[in-house]
């Protein structure tokens, strides 16, 4: 029988950047594959762009639930799709061309719409 006195649940209010710098994150094998269509990606970054343009200091992306995994890895129990989309797309900003808009870099990855339609996953 498990000793329940050793179990604990904690809630920490931090942003994505802090979570990524604080822990190594992993996705357990029981999580579904990445499945967001471009419609969901566009909506997420439309909302982020609006918040950025309105100079809102905080944008609530949603809850990300992490559990303790092996060693120092935190496993993403909930929020994997938002987390993956946000980190992969914003990572593109490091290589952004000055002539491209924030929207172009985040949503289309800086790829022209005609070329974008040739991509299956948009990644």
Image: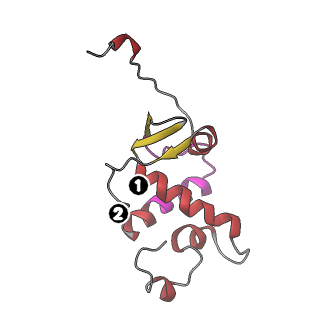
Q: Farthest residue toward the right?
A: 98
Is residue 57 magenta-colored?
A: yes
Answer whether labels 1 and 2 touch (C-beta < 8 Å): yes
Coloration of the structure image:
secondary structure
The front one of 77 and 49 is 77
- Residues in magenta, as a range: 44-63
Percent position (x, y) of residue 95?
A: 69, 69
State which quadrant residue 10 falls in.
top left
Percent position (x, y) of residue 65?
A: 42, 38
Q: Farthest residue toward the left?
A: 1
> Which mark, residue 81?
1
Sequence-first tag of 1 and 2: 2
Q: Farthest residue toward the bottom?
A: 114
The front one of 82 and 69 is 69
> Which mark, residue 105?
none
Is residue 56 magenta-colored?
A: yes
Q: Residue at image x 56%, y 67%?
A: 106
Graded by Cα atoms within 10 Å as few (under 14), some (14 to 19) or many (20 or more), the crowding at tag 1 reads some
Quarter of the figure with the N terminus? top left
Percent position (x, y) of residue 105?
A: 60, 70
> Which mark, residue 35?
2
The front one of 58 and 80 is 80
Percent position (x, y) of residue 27?
A: 43, 49
Q: Residue at image x 63%, y 50%?
A: 55
Graded by Cα atoms within 10 Å as few (under 14), some (14 to 19) or many (20 or more), the crowding at tag 2 reads few
Give the answer, above or below, for where 114 lies relative to 20.
below
């Amino acid at each position: 029988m498990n000793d329940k006195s050793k179990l604990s649940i904690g809630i920490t209010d931090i942003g994505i950047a802090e979570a990524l710098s604080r822990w190594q994150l992993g996705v357990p094998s029981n999580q579904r594959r990445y499945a967001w269509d471009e419609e969901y990606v566009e909506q997420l970054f439309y909302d982020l762009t609006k918040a950025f343009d309105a100079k809102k200091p905080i944008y609530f992306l949603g809850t990300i639930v992490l559990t303790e995994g092996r060693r120092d890895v935190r496993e993403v129990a909930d929020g994997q799709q938002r987390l993956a989309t946000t980190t992969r797309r914003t990572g593109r900003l490091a290589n952004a061309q000055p002539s491209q808009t924030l929207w172009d870099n985040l949503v289309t990855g800086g790829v022209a719409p005609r070329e974008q339609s040739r991509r299956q996953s948009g990644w």
